[in-house]
Amino acid sequence: MTETLLEARSVSVTMGSIQCLNRVDLSLKTGEITGLIGPNGSGKSSLLKAMAGLQKTTHGSVWLAGKNITHCDSRERGKAMGYLEQNGDVHWPLPVKRLVELGRIPHLQGWQSPCEQDQRRVEAALKQTDTWHLRERTVTTLSGGEKCRVLLARVLAGEPKMILADEPIAALDPAHQLMVMESLRQFAAAGGAVIIALHDLSIAARYCDRLALLKEGDLIIKASPNDVITEARLASVYGIKATLRRDENDCLTVTPYALTDEAKLLSP
Amino acid sequence: MWLGLLMGSVIVLFFISLTVGRHSFSLWQTVQELLAQEQSVYTLILIELRLPRSLVAVIVGATLGLCGAAMQGLLRNPLASPGILGSSSGAALFSVIVLYFGFHAISPWLLPIAGMAGALLAIVLVYALTGNDSTITTIILAGVAINAIAAACISLAINLAPSPYAVREIALWTLGDLSKVSLTNLWLMLPTTLIGWLMLIGCGQALNALSLGEQTAASMGVNVARLRWRIFLATALAVGAAVATVGAIGFIGLVIPHLLRPLVGYEPRRLLFASALGGAVMLLLADISVRLIPSQIPLQVGVLTALVGAPFFLYLIVKLRKELP
Ligand SMILES: Nc1ncnc2c1ncn2[C@@H]1O[C@H](COP(=O)(O)OP(=O)(O)OP(=O)(O)O)[C@@H](O)[C@H]1O
Ligand SMILES: [Mg+2]
């Protein structure tokens, strides 16, 4: 039985004079991976932040387990959600293992140190993201993709009920992209909910149960990948021409090959 | 392991500090006299001068180290220190005003109270200048501005001071001095210092989370705005009391967290306690040194920490420049 864990109700966000989001409704359900797609600046990160309770909404509200998220206990919120920042950074040259341990903070009291059980979660998270061999390294010496995976391990180590990930695979090689998506699928299969911002439309189509397409702050459509990704929509939202190929499992592969004529006119 | 070593050093240096001074006498014998409730010049020196001096050195050093570690963790900047928010110089300015007008003759309590008020005012001014959701950069800039204003006013006080004696008193005081502290000073500074310490020690977990950035820390349940003001207020209480008692002793809050960070695996939470111990070690060492260095006019302890700390600051900048691309 699926249950709604997190719900954005008619959420608008304005920053300065820019309306980043315009009355967006979206809910996260257990067992589901929701893909968030749209061009640069369409409001994907803003929506994730708003849903994580990190961004004030100018209209509407976000509901976590039947409670307005602004009234939720911040500790409970931290336990329930794992939020992965776009281009997240680490400010001290921490050893990788310590960094992943930070994911346990919502479960620890003031001066408590991570216990045996916490350590086991940390180890599992390191293995899931294929960063076990990096555990003794200093995070500042890692490659871009390695760091991304370690930061994802931090989220997994917190055992959240839902994961809100902002472009977690943008810097990864193809094998690790698939590996990360597989572990998110496992997470969802185990009863978690996932929302993930993506630019790789083929991966989005293959792994997401639903896609939400944003354009200039408007939620254009939320539906199954096959309904969302059509040639006409790719042309109107992204300004691209693409070949769509469906394999025997009805799974889409999207290969952009040219800008549309209108987009060409706009580009320098 | 390192914590044990630091703790051992604090204890050993504390006892050494009790034995060093113009009059040399056997610590052991004097303690025995004390236990036998006999009074002598030496028991008086020990109880009224050396003991408060050593205890205050431990407390002030720990305050500066702890506040430095907390500020660096909060601002995620290894060059930050309690001075950055202007709380040290705010406290110094208010204390100088009290000294300048001779208010401390009315009541000895006025000096520490002024120090804390100055530190608090500096914090409130920073708050007023930066507003509620301010970035770290604006906070640092506000601190720079407050420091500049306080420095200008202290210069004005020295400039307008009525007598050379007043000039000397104010100038020496701003250099930092442990030689005049008494048990009364100790009791006066203790309450706010302890409150400040307790407020800071509880911040460890949140500071750890902050090493992942403010957004991520917030997503993990840390109220970043509240944490920021908690640390500012705690620093004002503890540093205000310390500066009012012994003057502005610089660089401990900067140097110590930096030296100890690699030893605690760069973890902000573990750095708090380690830096408190390290700060106590550094100030005890400096205070013992100024008493051992032969000199006609006694050296001020703040001068020594600055002489050691400022070149270290330069070294840090050069090192950071090499590490960063
Ligand atoms: N702090 C800010 N102040 C002002 N405008 C902002 C701020 N952050 C984002 N915006 C604007 O809000 C809009 C949506 O930004 P958002 O980061 O949500 O886009 P995105 O879909 O995540 O883009 P990308 O694919 O590049 O990550 C953009 O027009 C952006 O310029
Ligand atoms: Mg984004």
Image (cartoon, rainbow, N blue to C red):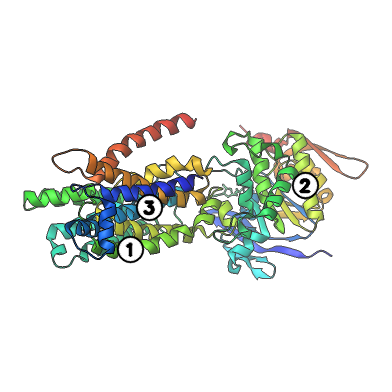
Q: Which residue is mark 1?
A: B190
Q: Secondary structure at mark 3?
A: helix
Subunit under mark 1: B
Taking the view exactly as shown, the residue that stands out farthest to the right is: A248
Which residue is pictured at 76% across the width and 57% down the height?
Answer: A192
Name the front one of labels 2 and 3: 3
Q: Does B129 sit left or right of A219 as displayed? A: left
Residue A215 in view, yes or no? no
On screen, B34 above or below A45? Answer: below
Q: Position of residue B116 (x, y in %)?
A: 29, 61
Q: Does B259 sit left or right of A185 as displayed? A: left
Which residue is pictured at 80% across the width and 56% down the height?
Answer: A190
Subunit under mark 2: A
Identify which residue, A241 or A250, lies in the foreground: A250
Residue A89 in view, yes or no? yes
Co-location on one chain, circles 2 and 1: no
Q: Which residue is mark 2?
A: A183
Q: Residues within 10 Å of mark 1 (few under 14, many from 20)?
A: some
Identify which residue, A249 or A64, lies in the foreground: A64
Q: Which residue is mark 3?
A: B62
Q: Secondary structure at mark 2?
A: helix
